[in-house]
Image (cartoon, rainbow, N blue to C red):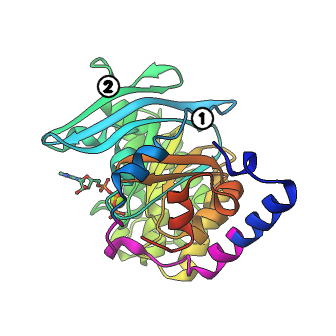
Amino acid sequence: MSTSEEHSPAQEAALVNEQARRAAQAGLNLKPSSRMAASVPAEQRLAVGTAPAVSVEDAVFSCRDVSVLYAGKSALSNVTINIARKQVLAVIGPSGCGKSTFLRCLNRMNDTIAGARVTGSILLEGRDILAKEQDVAQLRAEVGMVFQKPNPFPKSIFENVAYGPRIHGLARGSAELDDIVCTSLRRAGLWDEVKDRLHRPGTSLSGGQQQRLCIARTIAVQPEVILMDEPCSALDPIATARIEDLMDELRASYTIVIVTHSMQQAARVSQRTAYFHLGELIEVGETNRVFTNPRQKLTEDYISGRFG
Ligand SMILES: Nc1ncnc2c1ncn2[C@@H]1O[C@H](COP(=O)(O)OP(=O)(O)OP(=O)(O)O)[C@@H](O)[C@H]1O
Ligand SMILES: [Mg+2]
């Protein structure tokens, strides 16, 4: 049920304006990690239900009824969503609502957590990635991940980027490997800053540069999808702006899923936004629409700062 079905065009316009005003007023750049999810009365949650399947024209990922249990306790419940090719999907929601859990489903990182159980179906280009036959190392090259805290290997800048192509046999010789490293660093917007010190440790770079190095490392193995879990939360505003600009360039070649606590960032970088609450996908749609005209009260309450 959408709000647009319940109001006249004039009422609808007024409603959209009011919601946009409240969203703008709400201090959207707050990181609500330290706040607890507001407890939602069961009857309201039942009334909201889970978001309907959302079709996108060209889906890279197609997730159906994905649920995750940690030691028998539900963390994600029946998530059904398509993720569109060469777009940025922002995943937002209160702390503990399952954003990272969902992201980790997409490259089977939950496999590394003892007691985690993932059910449902996740198709990547039509292929079931939860199948036993799925080569997980290969999957993680196709679906790369950039974490909250930059985590370069304790190796040189060059080796950080060369490592993946080498183990996946992507270069036929050292000239080709040099080329992959150079291209990846260029695409990550880091080449000019590091070309004269490729053999210095990756950890000698600033935090923002390290995060771009991690992006270069991810790109080097020619992924289809890049997952980013709060990639800017440890960065200053200038480094954050660099990464956001970079995401805009990268989406010409890659599909990106970013978890962020900054709704301003979600609005700036993404074309679609998914709102999660207590392990459920409440709403997903075009970013501008979700922020200005949310269809679910839970989404509206969150983006207008009524709870975090
Ligand atoms: N390794 C784990 N073992 C057990 N429970 C976990 C584990 N990781 C997450 N959980 C639980 O699963 C739920 C979802 O956690 P998740 O980390 O996905 O939330 P999140 O939305 O990413 O939160 P945040 O915004 O704080 O990063 C929470 O209740 C959390 O306590
Ligand atoms: Mg998280």
State the image quarter where residue 19 is shown.
Answer: bottom right
267 horizontally vs 12: left or right: left
226 horizontally vs 133: left or right: right
Q: Is residue 62 above or below residue 289?
A: above
Q: In this view, does 154 lie above or below 77?
A: below
Identified by mark 1, the residue type is Val
Q: Can the viewer see residue 178?
A: no
Q: Is residue 202 above or below residue 34?
A: above
N-terminal of the pair, mark 2 or mark 1, is 1
Q: Nearer the viewer, residue 286 or 217?
A: 286
State the image quarter where residue 107 is shown.
Answer: top left
Image marks 2 and 1: residues in contact by CB distance under 8 Å = no
Residue 33 locus on image (x, y percent)? 36, 71
Residue 302 locus on image (x, y percent)? 50, 66
Graded by Cα atoms within 10 Å as few (under 14), some (14 to 19) or many (20 or more), the crowding at tag 1 reads some
Q: Is residue 32 above or below residue 123?
A: below
Q: Which of 3 and 160 is in front in this view?
A: 3
Q: Which element is circle 2 on?
A: loop
State the mark number for residue 135. 2
Residues drawn in magenta: 19-38
Q: Which residue is disc 1 drawn over? A: 54
Graded by Cα atoms within 10 Å as few (under 14), some (14 to 19) or many (20 or more), the crowding at tag 2 reads few
Q: Does the magenta stretch include residue 26?
A: yes
At x 37% / y 33%, what residue is drawn?
66
Confirm if mark 2 falls within 8 A of ligand 1: no
Identified by mark 2, the residue type is Asp
- Which quadrant is home to the N terminus? top right
